[in-house]
Structures are given as C-alpha cells and as structure tokens.
Image: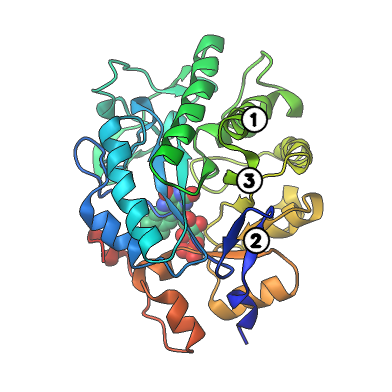
Amino acid sequence: MTDNLFQTVTLNETITLQNRILMAPLTRSMADEKLVPTQAMAVYYARRAEAGLIISEAVIIRPDAQGYPNTPGLFTPAQINGWKVVTDAVHQAGGKIFAQLWHTGRVAHSHFFDQSGSTQVLAPSAVGVEGSVPRMRELTYQVPKAISHDEIIQLIADYSQAAANAIDAGFDGVEIHGANGYLIDQFLHYDSNRRTDEYGQTAENMARFPLAVVDAITARIGSDRTALRVSPGAYFNMNGDSKDRAVFDYLLAKLEERDLAFLHIGIFDDAMEFDYLGGRVSSYIRSVYSKTLVGVGSYSPETGSKAIAEDKFDLLAIGRPFIANPDYVTRVREGKELVEYSAEMLASLL
Ligand code: FNR
C-alpha cells in the first residue's frame, strides 16, 4: 500500500536517495553554548539514516541569524568540525544529509548576538512581530531595522559562505530555508516587506533577494546540491495578503528555470487552504512548478503514499513522526505500528 515510498529516486542525475521519505528539518535546540553540534546530535541523526534524505534542523548562517536558544551554526571552524562528526555518522549508517541554512530575520533576538558585536535585528522593513522567543518568554520580539543595500550584499555572501562551509562539513547539499516567516520569506510577503527600493513593491523586486541567495549558492556548490523551502501560504510569523500570490507566481516561474535538487513546501498541515492560492499550498505549487517537489504537513505513510501516487508531489517529508520513531522507515516498510508524537519528546534527543 505504501510501496511507492520505497522506490529509489535520483535527483538531477546526481544524488540517489534510497527511498522517497525525507526527514523534515526539525529544530531541537541541542547545540552547545558556542552553537557547536554535539555528539548526541550525531547519534540522533545516525539513528534516522534510513531516510532517503535527512534535512538537518535549521542551521544559522551567522550570529545575527539566531532567534532561538542553542540552534547550531555553520560559521565557525568549531561548528564545521562538529557537523563533520554528524555527517560522518549519517554516511557510515548509509544515509544522506542536507544542511538547512537559516536566518530568522525579524524573528531573531539581539540577546543572542553577543559574539558578533551586532545589536540590531535585521529584516526587509522595520515591521516587527508580536510575541516572544519560545522557551525564553522574557525576550519579547524587537522592531527590526530595515536592512540596507550594503547589508543585503553582505548577507548574500554570508549565505554562500555557509553553503561552502556545509560542503566542507561533509553535507551532501543544502536546503535554503525560505519558509515559515523567516528572513527570505519576509522578503516574499507584503506583510513584512514594505520596501520602496529594488527589493520591494513588485513581485520581481520582492523575489530579488531570495533569487540572489539561490544563485549565489548554486554558483558556489552547484544547483544539484541546492534545494529551497518555501511557504506561499502565510501561516507562521506572518499575515497573508492576496497580493502575495503574484510574488510566488513570479518566484516559482524563475525557479523553474533553475535546476534545483528539489523544492520543499513549508507547512504544518497540508490540509490548510489559502484563498489567494486557490486551495492547498501543494496543489498551488504543483500547478505552477513542474520539477521535483517535496510535500509535507501532517501526512501519514498512507496519505503521503496516496498523494505521491496521485502526483501531488514526488517525495514525502516527515517531521514529528520521525522524532517519535527513529526507525520510521523500517516500521512503515514492515507495517509496524508507529509511536505517537508528543511535544514532551522535544525535551531530549532520542
Ligand atoms: C519544525 N519545522 C521546521 N521547519 C523548518 O523548515 N526548519 C526547522 O528547523 C523546523 N523545526 C521544527 C521543529 C519542530 C519541533 C517541529 C514540530 C517542526 C516544521 C517541520 O519541518 C514540518 O514542516 C512540520 O513538522 C510538518 O510535518 P509533520 O510533522 O506533520 O510531518
């Protein structure tokens, strides 16, 4: 019934996956105080190496990218060396792993910026979000500074360097985190992008920074090793606007011209519908983007397999059930019952 999940797939004739099940990126806040991955993280990821591809938890590209405690980085030699232990462990267990590259933009907090000397939260525009840092509720979100032209150029260079660092650290590729209301997504929605320069106001302008990051990274490490996650449906740290649709229509048409390893949907529940997208995010993206698409969001093995059979997407990413079931792939293949996920499981790496 779920046989199609166990087919091998080759992405752009370069990277062969042993099955169609991806481990979705899952922030676990388990890096040490210098944001270096720990030995426990190597064990955690290696236990899940049966996935066709692991996408790492989001990894910050530089100090002012950080918005949550103990999220790992990829900008110091110690962090790169820490990741080498993780990628070696995954490879030895027969798996493959991409690093998810992250800048939280206006969801960052200057509390975390100590190492850089920078004190200001950067975002496309000086429009803050309500709320506070999870697990550190005393840190309320700050009104960001609208990022300058020179800072944009530097950020693109820093994304590209983080991608090169990921390859040095032994990752098989990178997924650019363009989803879930973080920096790249902030450029793509009218709620957070009020710029009047060449990065705002029109679809072409609003897609300029995201595409520049994609192009800088593909030039550095190759399009076959570069993927992107996007959230056309504003559902997290973001308010939707009917005009957002045109921005994504433009962006996805431009991405169609690039041979990315895959495009990955960012959503918690793919049953959610968005008026301005004409329904589900997966249906919308499939209608305007023809290349390899990764679906996600509250899928079971059966509903995910059915969605692939119906050509709604090509690969299935699994998040919370992979926390609860390190041997998710074996359990599904053998028809064994899955352990149900609960939020308490986030307290430790299993
Ligand atoms: C997430 N998700 C997420 N997404 C992302 O792009 N980068 C990340 O670091 C995280 N971190 C994260 C942590 C935790 C604890 C959860 C529950 C989720 C979203 C995740 O990748 C996925 O899209 C959702 O969990 C929906 O898939 P499932 O869990 O329904 O299979």
Residue at screen point 65% across, 20% down: 199
Is residue 154 placed above or below 19 in the rendered structure?
above
Nearest to N terminus: mark 3 or mark 1: 1
Q: Are circles 2 and 1 on residues that touch, CB within 8 Å? A: no
Q: Tag 1, which secondary structure? A: helix
To which residue does mark 1 refer? 215
Residue at (76% x, 56% y) in the render: 286
Whole-number angstrom distance, CA of label 2 to CA of label 1: 22 Å
Give percent across and percent down for residue 244. 70, 38
Classed neighbour count for the residue bearing mark 3: other residues with Cα under 10 Å, few (<14), some (14–19), many (≥20): many
Rate crowding at label 2 as few (under 14), some (14 to 19) or many (20 or more) other CA atoms within 10 Å: few
Name which residue lies at 32% across and 16% down.
118
Mark closer to the observer (2, 1): 2
Residue 109: quarter of image: top left
Give x and y (percent) for residue 249: 77, 41
Left/right of residue 47 with respect to residue 253 in the rendered view: left
Can you see residue 245?
yes
Give the mark nearest the N terminus, 2 or 1. 2
Q: What amino acid type should be assigned to the residue bearing mark 3? A: Asp
Local secondary structure at mark 3: helix
Give residue 130's quadrant in the image. Answer: top left
**Residue of label 2:** 10
Q: Position of residue 239 (x, y in %)?
A: 57, 40
How is colour applied across the structure in the image? rainbow
| Secondary structure found at label 2 | strand
Q: Is residue 322 left or right of residue 225?
A: left
In depth, the one of 22 and 134 nearer the eye is 22
Q: Which residue is mark 3?
A: 224
